[in-house]
Image (cartoon, rainbow, N blue to C red):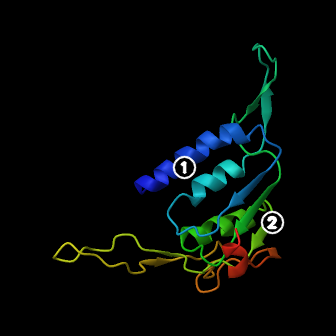
Amino acid sequence: MYQTQVILVLHLLIDIIFLSKKKGVVIDERNNGGGSAADYMIDIMSREVVGYFNSKTESRKPWTTPMAGIWGPKVMIINERAGSGGDLLPYMFKEKNLGPLVGTRTWGGLVGTWDTPQFIDGGRMVAPRGGFYDVDGNWAVEAEGVAPDIEVHQTPKEVLSR
């Protein structure tokens, strides 16, 4: 896993402790260039409360088990600049029925680029090394992206006016 992905997951875990006290969450996944953190993020977002521990702390508020998760409603914002792992995160979010996807269809570049050998001079190139298929054995996401449940376009004029 890349160092930036590890940092992203650590930030997410820290945020989850804070977010578990919130009533819901909006995940802004726009412009996600990818990586291997989607499955970790979905694991946490799909957790369900299975019980409580009584607490003798000052507030007497019971602790949930699992201890951290996002228990309330969730919505994910996506766009056409999200690809690779940025395609996988909304795909998994949708497959797990975690909430609606809002925005525009993702890029559709969900391929693995692992193990691309270096050139003899130390340079590199990136080439697809593996494609993604669903549990039924069908090619999925590649060249089609993940469609939103609610389509919302953000025009350049709107972006520049902020």
Residue 49, image quadrant:
top right
Q: Residue furthest left?
A: 121
Image check: 111 left or right of 125?
A: right
Among the 4 quarters of the image, the one containing residue 89: bottom right
Q: Which residue is mark 1?
A: 9
| Residue at horizontal 57 percent and vertical 67 percent from the top | 32
Three-letter code for the amino acid on which mark 2 is drawn? Pro
> Residue type at mark 1?
Val
x, y percentage for residue 99? 80, 61
Judged from the image, the secondary structure of the residue bearing numbered disc 2 is loop
Q: Helix, strand, or loop for circle 1?
A: helix
Dot 1: within a 10 Å radius of its alpha carbon, few (fewer than 14), some, or many (20 or more) residues?
Answer: some
Tell me, yes or no, whether the two marked residues, 2 and 1, touch with CB atoms within 8 Å. Answer: no
* Residue 62, above or below 126: above
**Residue named by callout 2:** 100
Left or right: 98 in relation to 80: right
Q: Residue at x 83, y 52 (%)?
A: 73
Q: Give the x, y percent position of residue 158.
A: 73, 76
Instruction: Tell me residue 37's x, y (percent).
Output: 54, 57
The residue at the point 74 percent across, 67 percent down is 94
User: In the rendering, at what x and y percent does residue 106 appear?
Assistant: 65, 77
- Residue 74 visible in rendering: yes
* Position above or below: 148 against 13: below
Residue 104 seen in render: no
Cα distance between the residues tagged 2 and 1: 22 Å
Q: Disc 2 or 1, which lies upstream in sequence?
A: 1
Drawn side of residue 151 relative to residue 40, left or right: right
Classify the position of the C terminus by image quarter: bottom right
